[in-house]
Image (cartoon, rainbow, N blue to C red):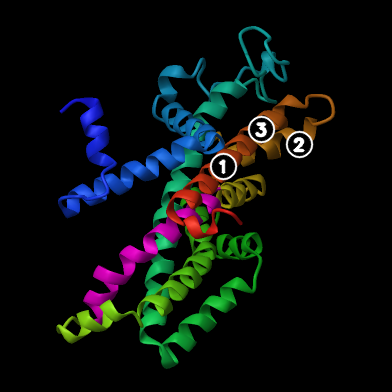
């Protein structure tokens, strides 16, 4: 099948099978996303971050943990240090490259834990209704009543400092918005005619929720997850800045900013470079999230 024939097959208005329809829908979504240049710019930055994290040992110019006290606080471009050195003489560029692994590790785990927990809580509350809905939503309201970073600080203080505890704390504070979205979608879907038909065919609540409600909630959750990535990165950096996230000598970006704040007036690059890294990655996720919203939730595209 030639490229032109494949394109016509994917753009057809009359798919011949369920698989054909799914592939055509994915391709049309990709074309919509591709037309959004800012979203593609964000996607390019994220892909570069992933590649940088995967190949960090090979592209890093120096060992990020090796100290050289005789070469400390060197400015940009000095003696092969493209972004300078920190207070212990460690190469900032190398530490930024290896720190991307920690950032992606936190983002990936939180993106797996929080949406799944929120989806489960929201769909059960929306489908069951009654006292189950009331109890689950009041629990959600309690979590939403506290600022995310403050609640994360409380959890980390109780669990202890460390990157795993930071991931767990951020996940525990990130799930309520997903539960609200999933509940709202479920309340709309459960009264649909096709849900009534499925129920008449003998399908139980578990099958209805997992097979017919969850798939319809996924697109909204994907958009929300992408837009929340910036907040997750900032929360992780905030915990690292306070010494409650990844522990030294790990090259975590928030911890690097915390170390560099002592020299911000005379040696600005020590704190500025990891700050720019956080800004760039957060912006990239926001741009991609806006593009995905246009693709997956067209009714909100003009808002």
The tally of labels here is: 3
Q: Could you say where residue 276 lies in the image, as x and y percent from the top left? A: 66, 32
Q: Could you say where residue 64 lies in the image, as x and y percent from the top left? A: 53, 24
Q: First in sequence, mark 3 or 2: give its number.
A: 2
Residue 276 numbered mark, or none? 3
Quarter of the view holding residue 121: bottom left
Secondary structure mostly seen in the magenta stretch: helix
Q: Of circles 3 and 1, which is in front?
A: 1
Label 2 sits on residue: 261
Q: First in sequence, mark 3 or 1: give its number.
A: 3
From mark 3 to mark 2, how far is it between C-alphas?
14 Å
Q: Could you say where residue 233 lies in the image, as x and y percent from the top left? A: 57, 46
Element at label 1? helix
> Does 67 appear in magenta?
no
Element at label 2? helix
Q: Of circles 3 and 2, which is in front?
A: 3
Region in magenta: 205-229
Q: Which residue is more in the foreground, 96 or 21?
A: 21
Residue 287 numbered mark, or none? 1
Is 177 located above or below residue 165 in the figure? below
Residue at figure coordinates x 58%, y 54% from the top left: 302
Quarter of the view holding residue 119: bottom left
Q: Of circles 1 and 2, which is in front?
A: 1
> Does 225 appear in magenta?
yes
From mark 3 to mark 1, how far is it between C-alphas?
16 Å
From mark 1 to mark 2, how far is it between C-alphas?
29 Å
Q: Quadrant of the N terminus?
A: top left
């Amino acid at each position: 099948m030639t490229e032109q024939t494949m394109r016509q097959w994917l753009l057809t208005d009359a798919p011949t099978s369920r698989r054909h329809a799914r592939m055509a829908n994915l391709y049309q979504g990709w074309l919509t996303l591709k037309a959004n240049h800012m979203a593609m710019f964000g996607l390019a930055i994220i892909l570069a971050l992933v590649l940088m994290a995967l190949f960090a040992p090979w592209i890093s110019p120096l060992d990020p943990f090796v100290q050289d006290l005789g070469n400390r606080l060197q400015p940009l471009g000095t003696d092969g240090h493209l972004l300078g050195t920190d207070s212990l003489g460690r190469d900032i560029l190398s530490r930024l490259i290896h720190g991307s692994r920690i950032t992606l590790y936190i983002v990936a785990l939180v993106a797996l834990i929080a949406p799944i927990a929120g989806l489960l809580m929201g769909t059960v509350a929306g489908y069951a209704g009654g006292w189950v809905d009331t109890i689950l939503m009041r629990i959600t309201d309690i979590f939403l009543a506290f600022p995310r970073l403050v609640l994360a600080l409380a959890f980390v203080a109780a669990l202890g400092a460390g990157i795993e505890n930071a991931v767990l704390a951020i996940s525990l504070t990130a799930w309520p918005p997903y539960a609200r979205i999933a509940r709202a979608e479920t309340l709309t879907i459960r009264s649909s005619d096709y849900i009534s038909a499925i129920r008449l065919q003998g399908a139980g609540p578990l099958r209805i929720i997992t097979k017919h409600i969850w798939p319809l909630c996924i697109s909204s959750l994907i958009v929300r997850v992408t837009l929340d990535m910036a907040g997750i990165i900032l929360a992780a950096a905030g915990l690292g800045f306070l010494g409650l996230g990844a522990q030294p000598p790990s090259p975590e970006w928030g911890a690097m900013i915390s170390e560099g704040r002592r020299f911000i007036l005379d040696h600005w690059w020590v704190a500025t470079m990891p700050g720019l890294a956080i800004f760039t990655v957060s912006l990239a996720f926001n741009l991609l999230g806006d593009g995905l919203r246009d693709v997956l939730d067209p009714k909100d595209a003009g808002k």
